């Protein structure tokens, strides 16, 4: 670590207790998650938070974050993902509006994940027009669905309205799948009482069936803690497992309970703690699995969904193990939603073998990934490891997409230090992914927000000239990206040899701290030669009030010694 940088940092934070406390309490992983998300999405400041838009046109599995720079994502912008190639999208609970044409003409978009706790209020005109979604849940706070929102969605067969009837614009559900059904709940019956159809939707009430009616659909066996359930009516298509039977909870779905059945969707209640072996295996028509991230599920058994046609799955935070071949050969499975708060510990042999997932997040508590867990996932291009390196057995990531990358976070660098590849994955420290070098320009991050305060430019100038007087440079801004331009091309080669990254992350309003940096006496610092290189990133949250939050991180990538 550079002696000069240490001197500056020590001088700078010496009399700034707020800064010192911020550094000590800073969550490093969330910072780099922000940087990683900035590669995928654009974030635009609006009233109440950020609006999000697609940036990476190669993205397939879009998991929109709930926050950026600790500020909520509240809107998906107009035409934000228009005509993109995404196959799945997870919309966070923080979003209150989806703009006009946001996911319009996304012909490969089959799955939209919106939780019951969503704060979504409005869905704009043409938001999902001509997409390939098969089912959608309208959260209970939605009060407006504009015209043509789901028009021309020819695969859309099921819509769940969790709340009272919202305003619904003309042709909102026109030209959808034949015999499509929309369901509302008894507690909202009054607002739906005069509605039998909406365009191509037949509207039905979901009645809570009596125990006697439930007994016609399922078999129940008493086990420890409640009941185990199995399919009885082989003609059942839309299976909604009750949470109780005879006042006792349903806690398990038994081995082979729905094996090779003709169900097309399954709703699993929060009461279920285990899914047995082969439970939904070879259910070739099963495409939709409804389960909450807040469910109490602990384990997913061996071959649980083997060779089914599911397109998306949410792994609840409570799950600790995914069994062998649990999702083996699920060739339509594009989206696996695993929360960062997951308690997952192990992923079994061939768990996701030959599925179509494009990206996956390995939670920080995972300690083992068994053989062939992701083998044959030919669309898998990105893996995020949120924690230390887990043990990985042979072919865990074999035969995946060419040039696939696995990212880890700087705080876990020690455990990853000797790992360059895992099967088909190239392993990269995520900070290297957000620092891009060219012959004459250094791109400082991606979508790194620059302050409107010109003192920031002066702060860059002061540090650069004090430490690196032989390197000519200018700072420029293109959109929301801040650049340091190297004016002398003869020095640019050194930036490819060694990059020293110093990150200051300021609140715009904290001008006093910026002034402190400007007023430092740097005259006694020893200057380095032009062979030593500084890449300075100033990430500034232009809409965040109050004082300095976050981070000073120094990261060195050295491929040769100082000259």
Image (cartoon, rainbow, N blue to C red):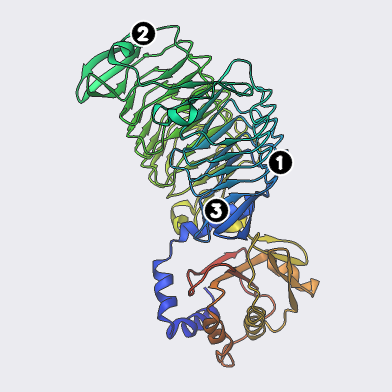
Q: Which residue is mark 1?
A: 82
Q: Position of residue 325 (x, y in %)?
A: 45, 23
- Name the residue beneath numbered marker 3: 73
Using a 10 Å C-alpha cutoff, classify the residue at mark 1 as few (fewer than 14 neighbours), some (14 to 19) or many (20 or more).
many
Asked whether disc 3 touches disc 2, contact meaning CB atoms under 8 Å apart, the reply is no
Q: Is residue 98 above or below residue 486?
A: above
Query: Is residue 278 shown left or right of residue 215?
Result: right
Identify which residue, 496 or 325, lies in the foreground. 325
Q: Give the mark, 1 or 3, whose residue is nearer the N terminus.
A: 3
Residue 139 is labelled as none
Q: In the structure shown, which secondary structural element does the residue marked by tag 3 occupy?
A: strand
Determine the residue positioned at 75% across, 79% down. 472
Apparent side of residue 260 relative to residue 405 in the rendered image (left or right): left
Mark 2 lies on residue? 232
| CA distance for labels 1 and 3 | 19 Å
Instruction: Please tell me which residue lies in front, 504 or 347.
Output: 504
Q: Disc 3 and disc 2: Cα gap in Å?
A: 44 Å
Spot occupied by residue 270 in the image (x, y as percentages of width and height): 34, 31
Left or right for 149, reference 369: right
Mark 3, Cα crowd under 10 Å, few <14 / some 14-19 / many 20+, is: many
> Disc 1 on helix, strand or loop?
loop
Spot the residue most to the left. 224
- Dot placed on the residue nearer the N-terminal end, 1 or 2: 1
Comes first in the chain, label 3 or label 2: 3
The residue drawn where x is 42% and y is 43% is 390
């Amino acid at each position: 670590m550079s002696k000069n940088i240490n001197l500056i940092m020590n001088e700078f934070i010496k009399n700034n207790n707020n800064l010192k406390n911020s550094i000590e309490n800073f969550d490093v992983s969330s910072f780099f998650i922000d940087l990683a998300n900035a590669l995928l999405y654009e974030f635009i400041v609006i009233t109440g938070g950020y609006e999000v838009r697609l940036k990476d046109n190669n993205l397939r599995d879009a998991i929109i974050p709930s926050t950026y720079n600790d500020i909520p994502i509240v809107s998906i912008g107009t035409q934000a993902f228009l005509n993109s190639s995404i196959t799945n999208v997870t919309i966070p609970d923080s979003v209150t509006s989806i703009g006009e044409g946001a996911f319009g003409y996304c012909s490969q978009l089959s799955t939209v994940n919106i939780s019951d706790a969503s704060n979504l209020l409005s869905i704009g005109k043409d938001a999902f027009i001509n997409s390939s979604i098969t089912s959608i849940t309208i959260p209970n706070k939605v009060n407006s669905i504009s015209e043509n929102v789901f028009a021309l969605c020819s695969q859309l067969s099921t819509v769940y309205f969790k709340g009272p009837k919202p305003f619904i614009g003309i042709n909102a559900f026109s030209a959808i799948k034949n015999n499509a059904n929309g369901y509302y709940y008894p507690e909202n019956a009054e607002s739906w009482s005069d509605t039998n159809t909406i365009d191509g939707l037949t509207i039905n009430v979901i009645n809570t069936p009596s125990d006697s009616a439930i007994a016609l659909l399922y078999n129940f066996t008493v086990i420890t803690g409640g009941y185990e359930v199995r399919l009885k009516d082989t003609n059942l298509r839309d299976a909604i497992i009750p949470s109780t039977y005879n006042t006792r909870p349903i806690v398990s779905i038994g081995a082979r309970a729905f094996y090779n059945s003709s169900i097309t969707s399954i709703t699993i209640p929060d009461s279920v703690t285990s899914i047995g072996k082969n439970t939904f295996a070879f259910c070739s028509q099963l495409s939709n699995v409804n389960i909450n991230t807040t469910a109490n599920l602990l384990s997913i058994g061996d071959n649980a969904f083997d060779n089914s046609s599911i397109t998306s799955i949410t792994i609840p935070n409570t799950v600790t193990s995914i069994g062998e071949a649990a999702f083996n050969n699920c060739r339509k499975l594009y989206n696996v939603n695993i929360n960062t708060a997951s308690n997952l510990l192990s992923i079994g042999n061939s768990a996701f073998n030959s599925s179509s997932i494009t990206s996956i997040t390995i939670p920080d508590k995972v300690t083992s990934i068994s053989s062939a867990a992701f083998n044959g996932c030919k669309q898998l291009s990105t893996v995020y490891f949120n924690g230390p390196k887990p043990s990985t057995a042979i072919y865990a990531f074999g035969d995946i997409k060419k040039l696939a990358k696995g990212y880890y976070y700087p705080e876990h660098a020690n455990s990853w230090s000797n790992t360059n590849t895992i099967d088909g994955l190239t392993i990269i420290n995520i900070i290297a992914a957000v620092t891009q070098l060219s012959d004459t320009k250094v791109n400082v991050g991606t979508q790194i927000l620059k302050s409107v305060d010109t003192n920031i430019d002066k702060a860059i100038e002061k540090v650069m000239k004090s430490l690196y007087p032989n390197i000519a440079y200018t700072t420029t801004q293109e959109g929301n990206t801040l650049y340091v331009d190297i004016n002398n091309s003869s020095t640019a080669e050194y930036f490819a040899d060694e990059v020293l990254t110093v990150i200051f992350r300021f609140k715009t309003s904290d001008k006093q701290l910026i002034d402190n940096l400007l007023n430092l006496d740097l005259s006694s610092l020893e200057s380095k030669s032009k062979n030593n290189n500084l890449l300075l990133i100033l990430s500034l949250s232009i809409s965040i009030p109050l004082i300095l939050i976050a981070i000073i991180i120094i990261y060195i990538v050295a491929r040769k010694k100082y000259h």
